[in-house]
Structure formats: C-alpha cells, structure tokens
Image (cartoon, grey):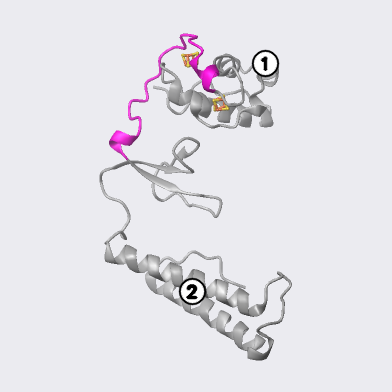
Amino acid sequence: MASTTIPDTSSELLAAVDEGWRVFREAVRHVGRARMDEPTGAGWTFHDLFAHIAAWHDLTARRLRVLRTEGRFGGYNEGVARLIAGGSMMGYALPDDETPITKATNCIIAALADEVRTDMHEWPCIRCGDCAMVCPSRLLPQDLLVAATTSDFAGLHTLGLQDCIECGCCDVICPSQILLTERFRIAKRSVAARTPIPVTSPGQD
Ligand code: SF4
Ligand code: SF4
C-alpha cells in the first residue's frame, strides 16, 4: 500500500516516487505479458489499466517540466495578502501557511491585496434585502443574522439555517460588509453543540 506520509524534503519525495514506481513495475511483472488482455475487476483489461496509469504519469511529468521551465515553483511571493482554502466564495482564510491541508482541500488561493477585502469593518444591517435577493436557497439572511446574534435556535431552524449552503453570495452583495456566511457557519456549529452563539464574528472589529 502506498505511503500517505507527506514528504518534507525533495529527496523524501523522490524516494516516495521511486517506491511507487518499484511497486508498479512489480505489479506489471506479476501480471505478465500473457495476461495483459484479461479483464480486471474494474472492467478494463490489465493493458488498459496500465496504459491509463502510464498516460497520467506522462502528463504529470510534462506538467512538472513546464512548471520548472517557467520558474513557477518556489511558493508564493510577498505580494500575497491572504491564503484561502477552498475557493474564492466558499473558502476559508488560512491563518498562515503552516496550516495543514488534507485530501479534501480542493484548492489554495494565494490572493493579492487588490483581490481580497482588507477592510474588515462592518456597518449595521440597513434591511435593504439585497442578501435575500441573491440567496440561492431563498433564505432571509438578514433575519438569520438577527436570530444568530440572539442565539435564537428556534428562529434559526424556522428560517432554514440548515438549508444555507454557505455559498457566500450574501456576503458579496451586502453593502454593510457584514460577514453573514461566517456567522452562519458558526451558528450551525453552535446549534449542533447546543451552545450559545458567539456575539462577534472573526471579522468584527
Ligand atoms: S451563504 Fe447561505 S444565506 Fe448566504 S446567500 Fe448563500 S445560502 Fe443564502
Ligand atoms: S444585504 Fe446586508 S445590509 Fe442588506 S439586508 Fe442583508 S444583511 Fe442587511
């Protein structure tokens, strides 16, 4: 079975690649030429499976070569204002680049200062209703906000907090720059734990 330990150094990475290659070659040798056209449990023949793996390895090697040629290795530079895990709208800001990632992390955005909101000040809700207009779940984020602020669990349930998909649309449209989605995430955790919802959000002054 392949190791799931993340290599710390390039030599550890090379050793892991070599080990994977050794296991793969052994598997190919074990099957042997005579059985290459036999079907496997996956429905493909051994030949097709090996060709598929080889094609992906070839593509990976070519991509790595391009990245090295273009000098696109080496992390990010000082111009990056925020690291975001999980996409521009539904993602989470990472506190630093020491934060571990998991196989569930679909992307990391290294956002420049002019690509993210750096002024985290919030103004009071003016009940404009814009958040409700854009909510794909047809919720009333402005009312959810009030219920979350007062730890009104029954109200949150009635208003459909559980149907919030945390898309971030209400945050983007809100003229008062209220971090609605983050509050709803916190509220969901508090509802699950039956603990009072914190009054402030991470983005508040
Ligand atoms: S984050 Fe939730 S409340 Fe806000 S727009 Fe998306 S689904 Fe609606
Ligand atoms: S968009 Fe912002 S200010 Fe307008 S109703 Fe929603 S939460 Fe309130």
Look at mark 2 in the image and give the residue it sits on. 16
The mark total stands at 2
Picture coordinates of residue 162, whole percent (x, y)? 66, 28
> In the drawing, does residue 87 fall left or right of residue 152?
left
In the image shown, does 88 or 66 lie closer to the viewer? 66
Callout 1: 10 Å neighbours few (<14), some, many (20+)? some
> In the drawing, does residue 117 fall left or right of residue 192?
left
Label 1 SS: helix
Picture coordinates of residue 176, whole percent (x, y)? 41, 16
Q: Is residue 130 magenta?
A: yes
Q: Residue at x 45, y 72 (%)?
A: 58
Look at mark 1 in the image and give the residue it sits on. 155
Instruction: Say if mark 1 contacts mark 2, CB within 8 Å.
Output: no
Query: Majority secondary structure of the magenta segment?
Result: loop
Amino acid type, callout 1: Gly
Q: Quadrant of the N terminus?
A: bottom right
Q: Residue at x 71, y 81 (%)?
A: 38
Tell which circle, 1 or 2, labels the residue nearer the N-terminal end: 2
Q: Residue at x 46, y 41 (%)?
A: 87
In the image shown, does 183 or 197 lie closer to the viewer? 183
Picture coordinates of residue 71, whole percent (x, y)? 27, 61
